[in-house]
Amino acid sequence: MSDILSFTSTLLNVGSASRTVLGYRFWSLLQKDAVVTTVDIDPDSKPDIIADAANLPLDDCTFDLVVCQACVEHIYDLNQSIIEIKRVTKKDEFLYFTAPFLQGFHADPSDYRRFTLNGFVDFVGSECVLME
């Protein structure tokens, strides 16, 4: 992951306006001049863009890396959201997802699903790398 982050100049953080969700180490590996854009449906989280992941008001092929951590279970239209996330990601660049498996129900504002690793890889439909 550090190799990816060292070459990332544009990052979209979907579902979180925070730089704390991924932890300090993640953010410390990012280029100092990287442009981070946050998008969330919750205006109270003060994202850069208030929008649903299924309808991102962003240009095609804009970001080197799109991060979607701990929010796929909260997205109602995940099919369309994956299409949108792939659309705004530069060709041959990276998506970083985390998804719960055994975590309990936690509506924020809603909680729709859980994935196994195989199920998520199949759902996303892209080459995936398991990072431990």
Image (spheres, rainbow, N blue to C red):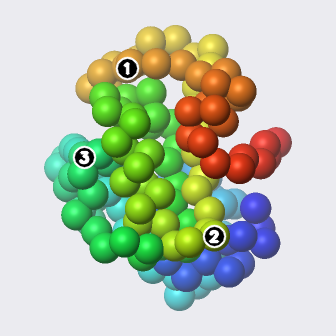
Residue 122 placement: quadrant: top right
Q: Position of residue 80 (x, y in %)?
A: 34, 42
Q: Is residue 60 above or below residue 86?
A: below
Residue lying furthest bottom: 33
Q: Residues within 10 Å of mark 3 (few under 14, many from 20)?
A: some
Q: Nearer the viewer, mark 3 or mark 1?
A: 3
Label disc, if present, on residue 126 of the rendered structure: none
Q: Is residue 73 above or below residue 19?
A: above
Please report the residue visible at 72 percent of the width from the left and 47 percent of the height from the top.
Answer: 128
Q: Residues within 10 Å of mark 2 (few under 14, many from 20)?
A: few
Residue picked out by circle 2: 92
Q: Position of residue 83 (x, y in %)?
A: 41, 49
- For marks 1 and 2, give the CA distance: 31 Å
Q: Is residue 31 left or right of residue 105?
A: right
Label disc, if present, on residue 52 of the rendered structure: 3
Q: Earlier in the sequence, mark 3 or mark 1?
A: 3
Label disc, if present, on residue 111 of the rendered structure: 1
Q: Amino acid at mark 3?
A: Asp
